[in-house]
Image: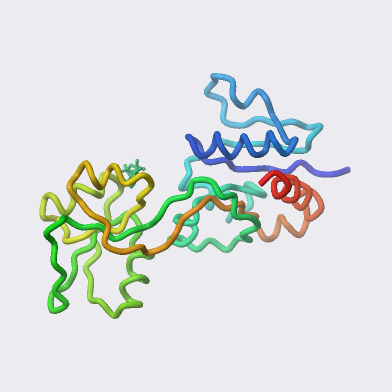
Amino acid sequence: MSEIVNVALPKGRLGEQVYGLFEKAGLECPDILSDTRKLFFENKEKGVRFFWVKPSDVAVYVGRGAADLGIAGSDVLLEHQPDVYELLDLGLGVCRMMVAAPKDFRDNDDMTLRVATKFPNIANRYYAGKSRDIDIIELHGSIELAPLLGLSDVIVDIVETGSTLKANGLVPMAEVVKISARLIANKANFKFKTEEIERVTSALSDVL
Ligand code: PRP
């Protein structure tokens, strides 16, 4: 008998778009969109069970095998580098990781650059590649405030529409990396449920 595939979906707008893809792929679970506080839903006939988890936790569930599959932003994957398979680029949640600064900022190579970010590993690797001496100021949100209050010189953050930068008088200076949502799989679970996981992956890939 084939086993059910456990899928960790990121709660929020991206998760709803991703669920839309599963639905299009014939892997629906209609109760999931009902207005309840319930966090898991299954469709035994279709062999899928979905969980809503915090977007930044998807890689934890998949990395530890509590979920077989999950959808995570490539920003989170680059930051935490979980030991998982990356099966598909879903082409959703597309945005860019960028360096941004106040309009009048001029970089001076003789000074340590103060960088505010939610992504210290990505920022460290980016500046190490440029042999630039930096001081990371790790924050968990509202990153755009840091240079305005003199806490940092620049930020490394996600830019989607650019309106948060604009509203706070910041300008993009360089692209660090392009970001999009990826389908990831737990390595050990993939071995045990290869057929089931491949069935889900190819159904999704067909509707992309
Ligand atoms: C993200 C990101 C930017 C903003 C970019 O923040 O950190 O602040 O969205 O989007 P935009 O280019 O379309 O304006 P989020 O909304 O997740 O909140 P946060 O500041 O609490 O991280």
Instruction: Please state which of residues 47 and 148 is positioned toward the viewer in this rendering.
Output: 148
Q: Quadrant of the N terminus?
A: top right
Mark count: 0
Color encoding of the figure = rainbow
The residue located at (40%, 55%) in the rendering is: 96
Whether residue 103 sits left or right of residue 1 in the image: it is left
Decide: is 147 above or below 92: below
Whether residue 17 sits left or right of residue 104 in the image: it is right
Relative image position of residue 98 (x, y in whole percent) = 33, 58
Quadrant housing residue 112: bottom left
Relative image position of residue 198 (x, y in whole percent) = 76, 53
- Please tell me in which quarter of the rendered image ligand 1 is found: top left
The residue located at (23%, 45%) in the rendering is: 166
Relative image position of residue 59 (x, y in whole percent) = 53, 52
The residue located at (74%, 31%) in the rendering is: 43
Whether residue 21 sits left or right of residue 114 in the image: it is right
Relative image position of residue 187 (x, y in whole percent) = 67, 60
Instruction: Please state which of residues 166 and 137 is positioned toward the viewer in this rendering.
Output: 166
Residue at the top extreme of this rendering: 35
Quadrant housing residue 117: bottom left
